[in-house]
């Protein structure tokens, strides 16, 4: 068996994967504190793919290439305590969540974000009666701190599952609001109708929804908050 280890340079260049788990190559380079040559970075990625350190996925029609650590990659990066390994079944959801959270932070609407895998004490987090979201967003607006649970809904869930999660959110005050992202406006409308019918005003006042195609400008994404149709920029600015 070949003994594999990362050089100090490779460890530094792959550091964004510890936070984001799966990320496109251009963003990985942009987030790196070191000056990185694109071609050199791609050569490194191909080499580490061949050694089983990294996995990858390319969007159709010559789209972005995303990279993520394999279990071996996690171990070599010192992230073996991270509870979640990237699975093919959830890869597209993980990509969408990573892209969205980085986009939200880039707009300056939030001070910090923690993805699901960063909740190292997830078991304790959940046992405290809290729902574990796809990400936690925290910020400050009008001199008041807030905490938002982010849910990325790429596919339609059963009404039962949606109700169970919303019931869990409403049962505690750890999160001030719940932000749900959908790829289609029709999915958003269906979910909002369900929440309104099942849970009423209390839920609607804490629920933010928006639809986004993961390509257009994020600030102009159409959303809804407290019964009003607003863009994301109008909600958070």
Image (cartoon, helix red, strand yellow):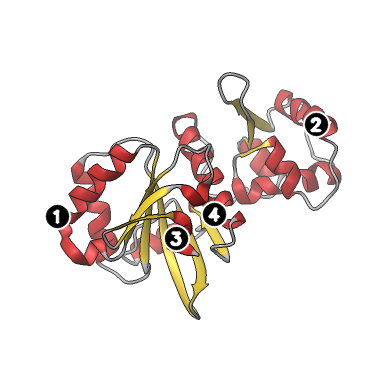
Q: Residue at position x 14%, y 55% from top?
A: 198
| Left or right position of 107 against 96 | right
Mark toward the viewer: 3 or 4: 3
N-terminal of the pair, mark 1 or mark 4, is: 4
Quadrant of residue 130 within the rendered picture = bottom left
| Left or right position of 158 against 97 | left
Q: Residue at position x 68%, y 28% from top?
A: 52
225 lies above or below 96? below
Residue under circle 1?
198
Residue under circle 2?
44
Q: Position of residue 35 (x, y in %)?
A: 86, 46
Q: Secondary structure at mark 4?
A: helix
Residue under circle 3?
234
Residue under circle 4?
104
Report how far apart the C-alphas of labels 3 and 2 lie in the structure: 42 Å
Q: Position of residue 38 (x, y in %)?
A: 81, 34
Disc 3 residue crowd, few under 14, some 14–19, many 20+, Cα 10 Å: some
N-terminal of the pair, mark 4 or mark 2, is: 2
Q: Residue at position x 29%, y 39% from top?
A: 187
Q: Position of residue 18 (x, y in %)?
A: 65, 49
Q: Secondary structure at mark 2?
A: helix
Q: Secondary structure at mark 3?
A: helix
Report how far apart the C-alphas of labels 3 and 4 lie in the structure: 13 Å
Say which of 218 and 132 sits in front. 218
Q: Secondary structure at mark 1?
A: helix
Say which of 14 and 136 sits in front. 136
Quadrant of residue 63 within the rendered picture = top right
N-terminal of the pair, mark 1 or mark 3, is: 1
Say which of 12 and 180 sits in front. 180
């Amino acid at each position: 068996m070949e003994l594999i280890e990362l050089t100090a340079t490779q460890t530094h260049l792959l550091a964004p994967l510890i936070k984001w788990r799966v990320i496109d190559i251009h963003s990985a380079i942009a987030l790196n504190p070191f000056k990185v040559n694109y071609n050199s970075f791609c050569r490194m990625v191909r080499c580490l793919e061949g050694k089983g350190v990294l996995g990858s996925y390319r969007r159709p029609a010559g789209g972005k290439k995303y990279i993520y650590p394999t279990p071996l990659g996690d171990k070599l990066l010192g992230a073996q305590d991270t509870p979640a390994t990237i699975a093919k079944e959830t890869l597209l959801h993980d990509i969408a969540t990573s892209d969205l959270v980085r986009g939200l932070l880039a707009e300056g609407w939030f001070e910090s974000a923690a993805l699901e895998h960063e909740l190292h004490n997830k078991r304790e987090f959940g046992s405290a009666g809290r729902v574990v979201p796809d990400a936690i967003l925290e910020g400050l607006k009008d001199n008041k701190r807030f905490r938002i649970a982010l849910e990325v809904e790429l596919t339609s869930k059963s009404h039962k599952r949606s109700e169970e999660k919303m019931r869990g959110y409403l049962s505690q005050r750890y999160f001030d609001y719940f932000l749900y992202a959908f790829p289609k406006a029709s999915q958003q409308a269906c979910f909002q109708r369900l929440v309104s019918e099942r849970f009423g005003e209390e839920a609607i006042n804490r629920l933010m929804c928006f639809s986004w195609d993961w390509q257009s400008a994020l600030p102009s994404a159409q959303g809804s908050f407290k019964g009003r149709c607003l863009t994301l920029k109008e909600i958070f600015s």
